[in-house]
Amino acid sequence: MNVNGFIEEDLEGANMGLIFGLSFLFSAFIAFALSGIVVHQTAVFQMMMPEVMEAGSAAEGQFGELMAQYGGNFRDFKHGALHGAIITVFFVFPLIAINALFERRGWGYIMIHTGYWLVSLCLMGGLLCQTLIY
């Protein structure tokens, strides 16, 4: 509250259902985008489109063989968390910092928000990388 210059009265009367509902929806958008970054196997699948979707095609067979041999590589929590950290440092932090600079916010504001996204994206990336099935 101090970093943003809020007082208790500023926070009263908010529609918390709408805030949490939209936050959930926007988090699903982020998870969808992040899944293609943390799971490298999707890039191979995308390169083989649309033939890989045809049952019995050579591309389907090649993809199946490739996944049998390499499908489990880099599919653990720590790898996804690493990608979440990389995205935070090289994408989220600059976005927050640029906005904060133009809004004349301080470094405390930037670090609080970057820290939140670091934790969120590391957890999200780790869980997606470990649990998604391709």
Image (cartoon, helix red, strand yellow):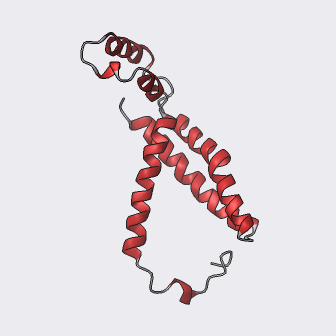
Q: Position of residue 95 (x, y in %)?
A: 65, 55
At 51% across and 36% down in the image, what residue appears?
Answer: 38
Say which quadrant the N terminus sits in: bottom right
Q: Residue furthest bottom?
A: 9
Which of these two is toward me, 85 or 78? 85
At 37% across and 11% down in the image, what residue appears?
Answer: 62
Q: Is residue 117 above or below residue 13?
A: above
Q: Is residue 43 left or right of residue 3?
A: left
Q: Position of residue 108 (x, y in %)?
A: 72, 67
Q: Residue furthest front?
A: 50
Q: Is residue 49 above or below residue 101?
A: above
Which of these two is toward me, 118 or 23? 23
Q: Is residue 69 left or right of residue 9?
A: left
At 72% across and 70% down in the image, what residue appears?
Answer: 105
At 35% across and 14% down in the image, what residue appears?
Answer: 59
Which of these two is toward me, 80 or 25? 25
Q: Is residue 86 above or below residue 56?
A: below
Q: Is residue 33 left or right of residue 8?
A: left
Quarter holding residue 35: top left
Q: Is residue 36 above or below residue 30?
A: above
Q: Position of residue 36 (x, y in %)?
A: 47, 36
Say which quadrant the C terminus sits in: top left
